[in-house]
Image (cartoon, helix red, strand yellow):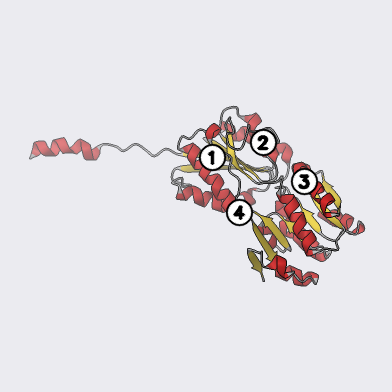
């Protein structure tokens, strides 16, 4: 009996190996508070938890935010690399990805390419086979600006001049919008933001002086911190507005068209999970959304004195009343 107890003891007393802690480096052009609280960022963390990577247990997320000062990105990216992250996350503008690439030569990078095409900009070989250490998710920004402009024109068939908010992150989108504008017979009043902090009061004054009849805001991470301010000014100046995702409609924008942003970030979390589990990013296709949602804010339509045509209304995935 004593012998049996002695033999059994090591099996029960043997120390279990500690669970490994993984580290993700998150680099944002925006604010640290938005990095933690935006619904799509919350969805990213939640999906990682569902996949077995839980903050406080086996996961640490190192957040670094430039607070709109893009010149700080290189320094912040270098700091993340020093933390020996297993994966670097580059959401939003291309400048975040560039900073990550320069800071590290071998750490896998997952992009959330909201406002640029990672193939056209030369960061990956192809969507199907990226061929290096970068993978992630990418919007169809070569096509979406045209669709957004078409929806605005359908809503306002008599419109001849549309203001477009653009910055250094949206060059490819602007080109697509210009091509679509020619086909639709509208003139784009391009308002370029070149230096942060962006002066939105001046931008709207410029749009009004040019007699713009609507506003198309191209997708830029640098616009996000001012989401509510931009939508408020659009209503104040009576400009029907179009944006890239549902959060802008919830903030008061008239129309949004694009992928569900929270789902988009959940897919990015799945890419991160695969890499943490040993997958090679070079062989992981960069994913693109396959479904897009049209959201209409009927309260904003009423404030603008607009009636949404039934042809548009029936296609809406969501109506905010």
Q: Work out how far the residue at label 1 is from the one at label 2, CA to CA, in angstroms.
A: 24 Å
Q: Position of residue 154 (x, y in %)?
A: 78, 62
Quickly name the residue at label 1.
Answer: 24
Q: Work out how far the residue at label 1 is from the one at label 4, CA to CA, in angstroms.
A: 28 Å
User: In the rendered structure, which disc, 3 or 1, sits on the residue that comes first in sequence?
Assistant: 1
Residue in the image at 63% along x and 55% along y: 292
Residue in the image at 51% along x and 33% along y: 280
Q: Quadrant of the C terminus?
A: bottom right
Q: Position of residue 26 (x, y in %)?
A: 59, 42
Q: Work out how far the residue at label 3 is from the one at label 2, CA to CA, in angstroms.
A: 16 Å
Q: Position of residue 120 (x, y in %)?
A: 70, 36
Q: Residue 291 carries which label?
A: 4
Q: In which quarter of the image is the N terminus?
A: top left
Helix, strand or loop at label 3? It is: helix
Q: Work out how far the residue at label 4 is from the one at label 3, CA to CA, in angstroms.
A: 20 Å
Q: Nearer the viewer, residue 318 or 143?
A: 143
Q: Which mark is residue 176?
A: 3
Q: Quadrant of residue 316?
A: bottom right
User: In the rendered structure, which disc, 4 or 3, sits on the residue that comes first in sequence?
Assistant: 3
Q: Which of 107 and 245 is in front in this view?
A: 245
Q: Crowding near pointer 1: few (<14 within 10 Å), some, many (20+)? A: many
User: In the rendered structure, which disc, 3 or 2, sits on the residue that comes first in sequence?
Assistant: 2
Q: Residue 47 carries which label?
A: none
The answer to the question of whether label 1 and label 4 lie on touching residues, with beta carbons closer than 8 A, is no
């Amino acid at each position: 009996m004593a012998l049996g107890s002695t033999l059994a003891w090591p099996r029960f007393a043997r120390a279990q190996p500690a669970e490994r802690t993984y580290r993700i480096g998150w680099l944002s052009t925006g604010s640290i508070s938005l990095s933690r609280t935006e619904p799509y960022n919350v969805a990213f963390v939640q999906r990682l938890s569902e996949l077995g990577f839980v903050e406080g247990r086996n996961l640490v997320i190192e957040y670094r935010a430039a607070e709109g000062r893009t010149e700080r990105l290189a320094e912040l990216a270098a700091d993340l690399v020093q933390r020996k992250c297993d994966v670097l996350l580059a959401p939003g503008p291309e400048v975040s990805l560039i900073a990550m690439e320069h800071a590290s030569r071998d750490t896998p990078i997952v992009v959330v390419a909201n406002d640029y095409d990672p193939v056209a900009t030369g960061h990956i070989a192809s969507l199907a086979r990226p061929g290096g250490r970068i993978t992630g998710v990418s919007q169809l920004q070569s096509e979406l600006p045209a669709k957004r402009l078409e929806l605005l024109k359908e809503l306002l068939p008599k419109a001849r001049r549309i203001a477009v908010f653009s910055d250094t992150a949206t060059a490819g989108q602007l080109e697509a919008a210009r091509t679509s504008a020619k086909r639709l017979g509208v003139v784009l009043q391009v308002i370029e933001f070149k230096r942060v902090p962006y002066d939105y009061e001046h931008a709207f004054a410029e749009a009004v002086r040019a007699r713009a009849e609507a506003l198309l805001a191209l997708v830029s991470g640098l616009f996000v911190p001012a989401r509510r301010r931009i939508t408020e000014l659009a209503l104040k100046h009576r400009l029907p507005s179009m944006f890239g995702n549902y959060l802008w409609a919830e903030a008061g924008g008239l129309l949004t068209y694009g992928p569900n942003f929270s789902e988009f970030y959940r897919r990015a979390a799945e890419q991160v999970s695969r890499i943490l589990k040993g997958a090679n990013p070079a062989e992981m296709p960069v994913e693109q959304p396959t479904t897009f949602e049209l959201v209409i804010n009927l309260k904003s339509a009423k404030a603008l004195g607009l009636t949404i045509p039934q042809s548009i209304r029936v296609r809406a995935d969501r109506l905010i009343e």
